[in-house]
Each structure stands twice: as structure tokens, then as C-alpha cells.
Image (cartoon, rainbow, N blue to C red):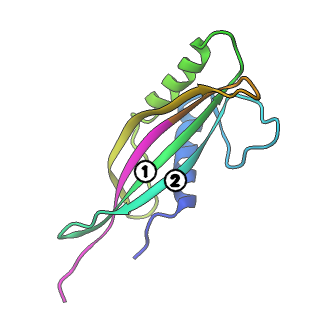
Amino acid sequence: MRKLSLTDIKKVIKHLIDENTDIKFVDHVEVNQPAPFCYVEVANTVPKNTKTMFVTVYNLHLRLVSKSANSSIQHDNNIQQIEEAFTNRLILPDTLDAFNQTDTSIVADYIDPKTNERNAVIGLSLTVAYGFKTKN
């Protein structure tokens, strides 16, 4: 039985961001990476098996970095683009199914004191079923 890998998570989120926003999704943040860009971190995974299914909840943090600006309007627009992108269902590989995909709100929103770039951390929770239990 195959579980969802962290690589799979990053690939499907990259596809969703690339298809639905004009924000660059990166897997590795380079020094002096031009903003805006975003990347995903796995906060934790929680097994939530049911009586009939093997289930894992993936709690993710999507980190958004926007250009330095006196106004927060462009940063807020970038957040909105990402939130709207996640109204589309993530298509997982193989027979895996994200039967609950929840935007868990903005975890943090701040200005980096070193770069003056605006940052947001957007929470996302994916509940993934990866197999049915059978009786022997």
C-alpha cells in the first residue's frame, strides 16, 4: 500500500499554484530569490485511521514572500490568489484521494525586518485516504 509522499505533495501543490496564480512556486529558496514566490512546508502528519480506511492528515504551511512595498495591497492580492487556487481540488497520484482539503487560515503575516519583504504563512490541511482495511 502506497502512502502520499512529501514529494507528491510538493508536486501537486506546485501544479495547482502554477496553473492558477502568477506566483512562482519554488522547492528551494535561493539567496536573493526574486519575489513573489511561495513554497510549502509540512508542519506535521497525523494518522487518523477509521474503522474501514487508512487515513493521514497532512498539515501544511504554504509560505508566501511578496515584494517589499509601502502598501500591503499587492501582498494581499498574492494571498488572495493562493487562497482562490486552493478552492480547486488537488489531484493526487494513483488511487490516493484527498477527501478533505481545508484552508486553515493565515497563520502569520509579517514584514521581514532584514529584507523588508512581506511574508504570509497560509495553513492547509489535507485528509488523505490511501487504502481500505480488509478482514482476514
Which residue does the image show at 39% across and 42% down from the upper left? 89
Residue indicated by mark 2: 42
Residue 83's x, y, as percent?
A: 45, 30
Quadrant in the rendering for residue 37: top right
Q: Earlier in the sequence, mark 1 or mark 2?
A: 2
**Residue range of the region highlighted in magenta in the rendering:** 122-136
Q: What residue does disc 1 label? A: 59
Residue 57 on image: x %, y %: 36, 57
Which element is circle 2 on?
strand
> What residue type is disc 2 on?
Val
Above/below status of 21 relative to 25: above
Q: Quadrant of residue 77?
A: top right
Residue that sits furthest to the bottom in the current view:
136
In the figure, 36 relative to 131: above or below?
Answer: above
Residues tagged 1 and 2 counted as in contact (Cβ below 8 A): yes
- Please indicate whether residue 74 sits to the left or right of residue 51 in the image: right
The numbered dot on residue 115 is none
**In the picture, which quadrant includes the N terminus?**
bottom left
117 or 81, nearer to the observer: 117
Residue at x 43% of width, y 72% of height: 2
Q: Is residue 119 above or below residue 7?
A: above
Residue 116 screen position, x and y as percent = 72, 23
Mark 1: few, some, or many residues within 10 Å (few <14, many ≥20)? some
